[in-house]
Amino acid sequence: MSASPLSLKPLDRHSPVPLYHQLHEQLVAGVESGEIPVGSTLPPEEELVELLGVSRHTVRRAMQELEYDGYIARVAGRGTTILRSKVSRRLTRLTSFTEDMQQRGQRIGSQILAFERVTASGHVADRLGIAPGSTVTYIYRLRTAEDVPIALTISYVPFPASAAVNRADLERIGSLYALLEGHNIPILEADRTLEAIAANEEHARLLDLPIGSPLLLVDGVAYSHNHVPIEYHQVISAGERYKYAIHTVR
């Protein structure tokens, strides 16, 4: 794909915000809005220097930040290519990964790494409000958007006897929440915590990242009718490819 035509605003030299960061934010906004398409290439550094009337150091620093954030790849002889926008999910809306990606028009993928009946540990049993040693269904999946690894999802579900669910059902439907709703077990609310962790060897291998890369861990419990816990989950997502949005009011 050819270089993307850019419409950049002049940088504010009187602002306390460094010029390189102003440029970084303009380019990020262009990628996230779709004005700068994924797969397109940015103009050469010298062209940006001339266009904005800034130093090469300013442009280079902005490019370094974009590369670190996972938005671009710089290859000698091929220029600077837009890799992707960050996938955004709202923590204030209770939606599944599948629903979020479909709303964004993303082509989603899901690889089931494990689907088995296991004995709940003390921690899992406590989060689900069940007796230790109870049997739950353990589901471990790799989730992708446009063939890019985005997140690992771990779910522990105490399926009732009336809901006979197997791996083939989940592979066919794709969404665990949709699968539960098909058995008249809607997910209505959830409690979640969010923290930063570093990628271990397994995370790095599955998400195609270096060991130690920053990851986001969402740990939570989803509830059905009458605040009955129906899923204890952990979502481990690539920090450079994923972001969470929160809307608050006062």
Image: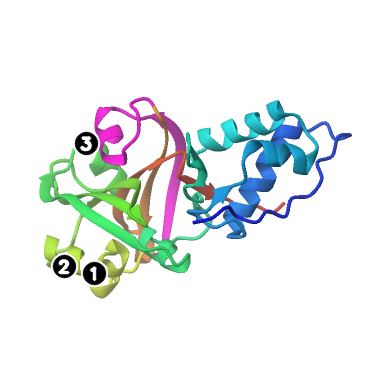
Identify the residue at image location x=29%, y=71%.
Answer: 181
- Residue 211 coordinates in the image, percent (x, y): 33, 26
Can I make out residue 163 in this image?
Answer: yes
206 or 170: nearer the viewer: 206
Q: Earlier in the sequence, mark 3 or mark 1?
A: 3
Instruction: Tell whether 241 sits left or right of 92.
Output: left
Tell me the SS state at disc 2.
helix
Query: x, y percentage for residue 172?
Result: 19, 69
On the image, numbered disc 2 is attached to which residue?
Answer: 169
Q: Residue at x 76, y 33 (%)?
A: 19
User: What residue sits right under mark 3 in the picture?
Assistant: 122
Q: Which residue lies at the image location 42% right of the left edge and 54% below the top edge?
A: 190
Per the image, the residue denoted by label 1 is 173
- Whether residue 169 sits left or right of residue 82 in the image: it is left
Q: What range of the chain is rendered magenta?
A: 188-212
Q: Residues within 10 Å of mark 2 (few under 14, many from 20)?
A: few
As drawn, 110 above or below 77: below
Q: CA distance from mark 2 to mark 3?
A: 28 Å
Under mark 3, the amino acid is Gly
Above or below: residue 182 compared with residue 110: below
Q: What crowding class fits label 1: few (fewer than 14 Cα within 10 Å), some (14-19), or many (20 or more)? A: few
As for residue 207 lying within the magenta part, the answer is yes
